[in-house]
Amino acid sequence: MELKELEQRFFEIFTGETGQTPKVFFSPGRINLIGEHIDYNGGFVFPAAITFGTYAVVTERSDNKVAIYSGNFADDGLVEFALTDLTKQPNEPWTIYVKGVIDVFTKASYEITTGFNAYVIGTIPNGAGLSSSASLELLVGKILSDLNGFELTGIENALLGQKAENEYVGVNCGIMDQFAIGMGQENKAIKLNCDTLDYEYADCDLQDYRVLIMNTKKRRGLADSKYNERRAECDAAVELLQTKAEITYLCDLTVTEFDAISAVLTEDNLLKRARHAVTENERVKLAVDALATGDLVAFGQLLNQSHTSLRDDYEVTGIELDTIVELAWDQDGVLGARMTGAGFGGCAIALVHKDKLVTVQDAIATKYEAIIGYPAEFYVAQIGDGTKRLV
C-alpha cells in the first residue's frame, strides 16, 4: 500500500493531528511451507513471512489513552480506551489483540507511558489462515517498543505476542506464527524448532516459481476438536515407543529408527499418526536441503508427499483441501502442492511457474467450484521481512 494513501486516511480520521508527522509500521502474515502438525511433536517447521500484512499509521498522544480505528472493521468505528483500563468488554472485537499485547507488556514490567492514535488496515484476506491475529499482535508490540523506547528483539516481541494470545485472548496457540512474523526476512524461510526456539534461516530462492495460496473458503469447524484428538493420539504413541527407545517426542526418531520399533504400535491410528510426524520432520530437513541446492523439483515433490501424509496418515484434510490440491497437481507448471495450517479447510499452497499463474489459477478455480459448489480464492505470496517500522 502507498504510504501517502495510508497517511491521508489517518488524517481523515484524526482531523486534529495534522501538525504531527506520523510513524508507519508494517507486520506481515505468514505461510508454513512444510512441516505440519509436528511442532508439538518436537519437530521442525519451515515458515516464512509474506508481503501481505497489517499496516499502522501512528502518532503519540499527550495523555494515556489509545484511540484506534481499523479500515477492515469500519463498522466498529473509533475505539478508545485508557492504558490503565485494559478490561475485556463483552464481545470485544479485534481490539482484544491490542489490549492483550499492552496487558502482557505491562505485566512483564515494560513501563508504557505513551498513549497513541492509530489507523490500522490489513491486506491479509479475512479467514485465509495467514495469521492476521499474530500479525496485529506483533504490530502493536513494535508500536509500543518504538514509542516507549524499549530495546525489544524480534524473538522477545514474538514471545509476548504469543503470551497475549494464550493468556489474554484465551487461544492456546504455539509460537510458530508469531516467530515467523517477528523474525521474517525477505526471500528467507525459517527452519524452527518450536520447542527449543533453535532456528536457522534458509535462502528461499524460488527462481521462476511463485507460491500460490489457494483458499478453499471452507470454515475449519473440525480443526479444534480434531487437533486435540491428534495430540492425544501422538502422546499415546510416544508412551508405547518409549518402551523401545529413550525419546521425549515422536520427532526424536529418524525414519529408520521408527521403522525398527514401530511394531509396538499395534493400533492402526497410532501407527499412522506417529508415521506422519516422523516422516514429516524428515521432509522438512530434505526441503531445506533442496532449496539450498536450488532443486525445486525435489522441493515440490516433498510438498506433494507432505499432503499425502496429512491426508492418509494424519487424516486432517477433507474433500475441499484434497480437491484443490489434486487439481493443482494436475496442472502444467505446478511442481508441488499441499495443504497448510491446521486442516479441515483453510488454505493450500502450490509452487507454480510465474508464466503459468493465470492459467493454473483459472483452471483450478473453474473445476473447484464445479466440484465443491462455491468458489475458492487465490493470492500470490512473496516472502518478505518481519515486523518493522517503515521509513
Image: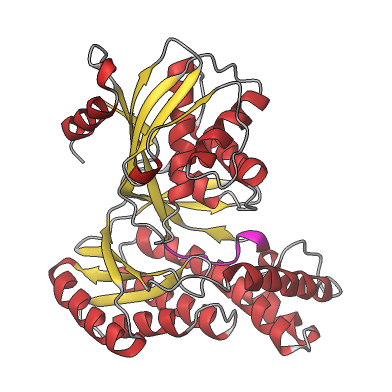
Q: Is residue 311 visible?
A: yes
Tell me the quarter of the picture where residue 218 sits.
bottom left
- Tell me where residue 39 appears, x and y as whole percent: 60, 59
Residue 329 or 103: which is nearer the viewer? 103
Q: Is residue 254 visible?
A: no
Q: Residue at x 26, y 87 (%)?
A: 367
Residue 266 or 263: which is nearer the viewer? 266
Is 202 magenta? The answer is no
- Tell me where residue 146 appears, x and y as whole percent: 43, 21
Is 35 magenta? The answer is yes
- 164 relative position to 229: left or right: left
Q: Residue at x 52, y 40 (%)?
A: 97
Q: Residue at x 60, y 30 (%)?
A: 86
Principal SS element in the magenta part? loop
Quadrant location of the N terminus in the rendered image: top left
Q: Which residues are magenta?
A: 33-40
